[in-house]
Amino acid sequence: MESIVFGIGITALAGALATVAGAAENTESDIGSQGDPNSQVQLAPQMGYLHRIFNKAIAGEPPAWGLWIALGAGIAWAFMAMQVNPILAIVLGAALATFVQGVYATTAYLGRTASLAKFGQPVFVDVLKSMTTVTMAHAFVAIFATVTVCHLMNAALGHPFPLPLLGLVWGIALGAAGSATGNPFYGKERQYQNQKYGAGVPIAASGNIVRYAEAGERNSLDNGWFSARLGGPASGVCFGLIVFLELWRTVLFEHIAAGWGAIIIGIIIILVFMVIDRYIEVWARKNYGPYGKPAEEASS
């Protein structure tokens, strides 16, 4: 009984850390314009719309975050093997992985902008300086929190996978959660605030992203302020639930039916969420219509 209570406590702590990691990952991605919404940022100069948005996507979020988390976990693992304190080892691993992320962001921004030179898109040095440091700060938080989750799985729950492999798996999951959950807040609601909500992006509007903020030209920090309010928490809750429910079902049901108990519970959880998602979607379409109409207008 004590071991189960201990496992549930570790599960709750891991879920909380994953929630922080998910929120930081999505904000980092939106400020850096990485992932699916970046296609419109990359297209904008080609359509004649110059902008001051940071543009660092040379890989999707899942492989990029798989690299950074695995790198941070691998470095921390090496330091722990040298008898370095685990907390210090994770901090050092996260710091060095964040340095790699900063190099990635710098070269990606310069390289992608250079490819747009014939369309007149300039390199803004102030954008490079200010955005890179902010994305690095958010990346450090996400890497540190996720590597800590991996260490808890090894040290407290006895997971057999080595720390770098856990980092790769959870890094890919972290990037996928942010890409699937948080990107719509930036790509659809922020980049195309001049389009009807829910209407998608008409072909004629491709690349015509919103380039002006409340005061002056919009930059990626403006996008970060916006997405940190909704997209970040949504991504955090998504990744937090993934980690929590994964560890919860393992701690409670892995010993039932030679491991099949945990698998069955996992399938049941997926089915329950499918039913909930479908109900919410039907309810929203019925009350608000396909393009965000007021409730009374959609129901009339």
Image (cartoon, rainbow, N blue to C red):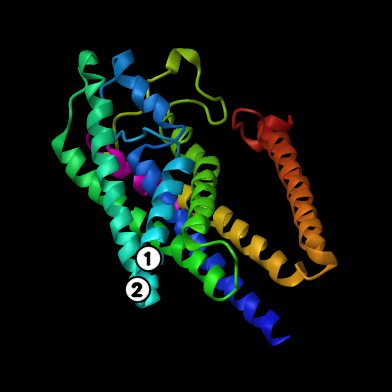
**Which of the 4 image quarters holds residue 32?**
top left
In the rendered image, the vertical position of residue 69 relative to residue 197, given as above or below: below
Report whether 204 appears left or right of 290. Answer: left
Query: Helix, strand or loop at disc 1?
Result: helix
Marks 1 & 2, CB-CB < 8 Å contact: yes
Q: Which mark is residue 291?
A: none
Q: Amino acid at mark 1?
A: Ala
Image position, residue 174 (x, y; %):
51, 51
Tell which residue pokes out farthest to the right in this image: 257
Report whether 20 appears left or right of 269. Answer: left
Tell which residue pokes out farthest to the left in this image: 125
Q: Residues within 10 Å of mark 2 (few under 14, many from 20)?
A: few
Image position, residue 73 (x, y; %):
42, 60
Q: Nearer the viewer, residue 208 or 57?
A: 57
Report whether 261 appears left or right of 80. Answer: right
Q: Nearer the viewer, residue 227 or 23?
A: 23
Report whether 265 appears left or right of 64. Answer: right
* Residue at the spot 57% in from the left edge and 61% down from the top edge: 161
Q: Which residue is mark 1?
A: 78
Q: Which mark is residue 82?
A: 2
Q: Is residue 223 magenta?
A: yes
**Which of the 4 image quarters holds residue 160?**
bottom right
In the rendered image, the vertical position of residue 94 relative to residue 224, given as above or below: below
Q: Marks 1 and 2, how far apart in space?
A: 7 Å
* Image quadrant where one finds the C terminus: top right
* Image quadrant where one finds the N terminus: bottom right
Image position, residue 236 (x, y; %):
51, 56
Which region of the structure is painted magenta?
215-229
Image position, residue 21 (x, y; %):
45, 58
